[in-house]
Image (spheres, grey):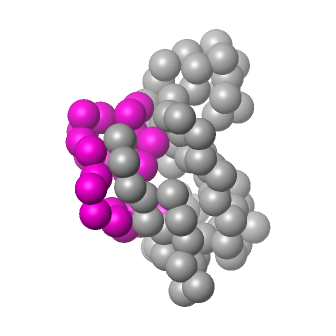
Amino acid sequence: MFVTSQGLLYGLGNNRKGCIDPSIGESKIFTQPHRTKVILASEGSESRVVLVAAGKARTLVTTSEDSVIAWGSNQNGARGFKGKDHQIGKPK
């Protein structure tokens, strides 16, 4: 995962557990940069990404609105939701 100077988020590789883009099937492998839109539920519009952290099967971003959004696997509570292992989640 990487962020452009314009705050756009892109990912490459295996979309395991929806870690690159939860709106696309898990088995997808991106061989070209894939743009992932980050939408805040409260705003309803795309947000500019400031920072990104990605693991084997999950992604977390900080937005220009000072929100932290996580998606992908929650194994062992990695996304911050206790007791919900192996769930694919939409950005929250």
Q: Considering only vertical position in the picture, is 8 above or below 66?
A: below
Where is residue 85 shown, x and y percent of the image? Answer: 55, 16
Instruction: Report the residue that reaches farthest toward the right.
Output: 66
Q: Nearer the viewer, residue 72 or 42?
A: 72
Q: Identify the residue at image location x=51%, y=48%.
A: 91
Instruction: Report the residue that reaches farthest toward the bottom.
Output: 6
Where is residue 63 shown, x and y percent of the image? Answer: 66, 68
Would residue 9 appear left or right of 83 to someone viewing this image?
left
Q: Is residue 34 magenta?
A: yes
Number of numbered discs:
0
Q: Which residues are magenta?
A: 16-38
Q: Identify the residue at image location x=65%, y=52%.
A: 53
Q: Is residue 47 magenta?
A: no
Q: Identify the residue at image location x=59%, y=39%.
A: 55
Where is residue 19 shown, x and y percent of the image? Answer: 45, 42
Where is residue 3 shown, x and y percent of the image? Answer: 55, 71
The picture quadrant where one finds residue 22 is: top left
Residue 41 visible to an observer of this rendering: yes
